[in-house]
Amino acid sequence: DTVIWQNADTAKHTITSGTVDGGPDGIFGGSNFISPGQSYKFTFTETGQFPYYCLIHPWMTGTVFVTDGYKTIQDVGKTVGDGSTTFDVEYNFDRILALNLIDQGQKLLTFEIIGNSQSDDGMLKIRLPTELIDGPFVIIVDGEKINFQESKDDDVTTVSILMPNDSKLLTIIGISIVPEFGVTSIVILAIATASILASPKSRFQLKF
C-alpha cells in the first residue's frame, strides 16, 4: 500500500522513519524538507508498525500500521460457558462483520453483515480457530446454503465465500464448537465431584 503525506502547514517538515530516541532507521523518508504544499509518498511492501517523526519538530510523531487487510473480532466465545475461553476471529471483507450468536447446541456461529459493498468483488475470507469451531462446515447466507472454499493451516481454517452484495446474515455450522466449560471449570468441576464422592458425611447417595 502507498501512503501519501501532504504538508498543509506553513512550515517545512520532514518525514523521517524511526524514533526520536533511537534516531532514523532508514526505512522511508529521511532528512529532506517537505515545503508547504508539497507531498511525500512511500509504498510499503511488508506488514508491521513503522514509527516516524519530524527532524525539525521532534515532538511531531506518528506511526504507520500496515496489515494484511484482515479485521479482527475479539473475544468470540466470551458469552458462552464460563467466559474464560475466547478467540479472535479475523476476516477480510469490504463490509463489517459483527458476531450475532453462538449456539452450542446447533454448533453454529452467526454474524451480522453491516454496511454496503464498495466493490463488485464480494469475496469474504474468514479465519476460524479450530478450537472455536471445526468443520466440515455448512455455510448459510440469509437462509440459503451457499458454496465456499476452505483451507486448513495448523489450528486455523480459512473459509472463502463469494457473498451477495445485499447479504445481511452469515451462519457457519460446524461439527464441534467452543466447549461449554473452559479448562479451569472442568478441573474445578472434577475436583468438586471427587470431593462429594470421597466425603463420608455426604448427604448424597449414589444408586445403581
Image (cartoon, rainbow, N blue to C red):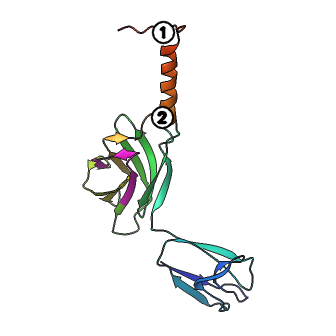
Give above or below for 140 relative to 13: above
Q: Residue at x 36, y 60 (%)?
A: 125
| Range covered by the magenta-colored residues | 125-140
Report the amino acid beneath label 2.
Gly
Most foreground residue, 117 or 92? 92
- CB under 8 Å between discs 1 and 2: no
Give above or below for 189 relative to 205: below
Q: Is residue 86 left or right of residue 103?
A: right
Give above or below for 149 relative to 181: below
Residue at numbered disc 1? 204
Report the amino acid beneath label 1.
Phe
- Image-quadrant location for residue 33: bottom right
Provide residue 86's location: percent of width, then percent of height.
49, 45
How crowded pointer 1 is (Cα within 10 Å; few <14, some 14-19, many 20+) is rated as few
Q: Secondary structure at mark 1?
A: loop
Q: Secondary structure at mark 2?
A: loop
> Any magenta on residue 81?
no
Number of marks in the rendered image? 2
In whole angstroms, how far apart are the C-alphas of marks 1 and 2?
A: 26 Å
Q: Residue at x 46, y 34 (%)?
A: 181
Residue at numbered disc 2? 81
Provide residue 170's location: percent of width, then percent of height.
36, 50
Q: Report if residue 88 is visible in the image.
A: yes
Q: Nearer the viewer, mark 1 or mark 2?
A: 1
Q: Report if residue 163 is visible in the image.
A: no
Provide residue 12's location: percent of width, then percent of height.
71, 89
Q: Is residue 46 left or right of residue 30?
A: left
> Any magenta on residue 136?
yes
Q: Residue at x 75, y 82 (%)?
A: 57
Most foreground residue, 71 or 144? 71
Most foreground residue, 107 or 36? 107
